[in-house]
Image (cartoon, rainbow, N blue to C red):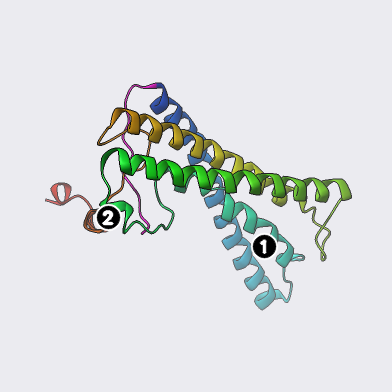
Amino acid sequence: MAGTATVLEDDSTLSRADRLLFRLEGFLNLLGGIFIFLLVLLATTNVLGRWMFSLPISGYVDWVEQSMAFIAFLGLAYTHRLGGHIRMDILIGQLRGRVLWWVELVSVLLMLLVTLALIYGSYLHFWRAYDLGDSSLDINLPTWPAKFVVPFALTILALRLLLHAWGYIRAALRNETEPAAVPLVESAADVAAKEAQAVMGDPARRS
């Protein structure tokens, strides 16, 4: 399922590192939202310019292609921190205690392994584009900034996965029921209740 999981905080070093990294993740997520907003403005200007003055924006497709990387990747770590990625937790949702945290740890380590491989490959792809001066076909827009954002965003995700691995190891060793700095597994009913509250607002405030 997908949603926003509960992430608890305490005074531990892990939790402080989690909050510090979350500030960076939040900023990158905001930056991705700004790119979406700018892309909407660009599309609106392009449509109106073509319709009213027969003057579309030169290189519109190039700008859209380059912006996709920023929109798609800048919010990766932010979403993972909140447990917002789609996942199948039919079995994991039935686990409790140390077993749950060890299973989550294995999952995080596998994701970290894949992420490190992607960082390596995407960095080589970025460096090749930078070294060769690769550019778009229409207006010769340099492609290396869009290609650089991929390994950069994946590196932030790798840091988040390392923090989650730290959190799951600590939770398993201490046999904690509600550990800090990791997204807690929630039932479908809990997720639905949180989504309903987000839409309807706080009943106490409305009354």
Residue interval drawn in magenta: 1-12
Residue designated by label 2:
191
Q: Is residue 41 visible?
A: yes
Residue 2: quarter of image: bottom left
Residue 191 vertical position relative to residue 170 in the rendered view, above or below? below
Cα–Cα gap, marks 1 and 2 = 34 Å
Q: Is residue 6 on the magenta stretch?
A: yes
Camera-side residue: 50 or 171? Answer: 171
Measured from the top left, where is residue 144 in percent x and y? Answer: 76, 49
Where, by quadrant of the figure, is residue 196 drawn? Answer: bottom left
- Residue carrying label 1: 64
What kind of residue is marked 1? Val
Check disc 2 and give the amino acid type.
Val
- 2 sits left or right of 73 in the view: left
Residue 30 visible, this orientation = no
Q: Could you tell me which quadrant the N terminus lies in?
A: bottom left
Q: Which is more N-terminal, label 2 or label 1?
A: 1
As helix, strand or loop, the secondary structure at mark 1 comes to helix
Relative to 29, say whether 56 is above or below. below
Disc 1 or disc 2, which is closer to the eye?
A: 2
Relative image position of residue 44 (x, y in whole percent) = 59, 67
The percent coordinates of residue 158 (x first, y second) are 56, 40
Is the C-beta separation of discs 1 and 2 under 8 Å? no
Q: Position of residue 113 (x, y in %)?
A: 58, 44
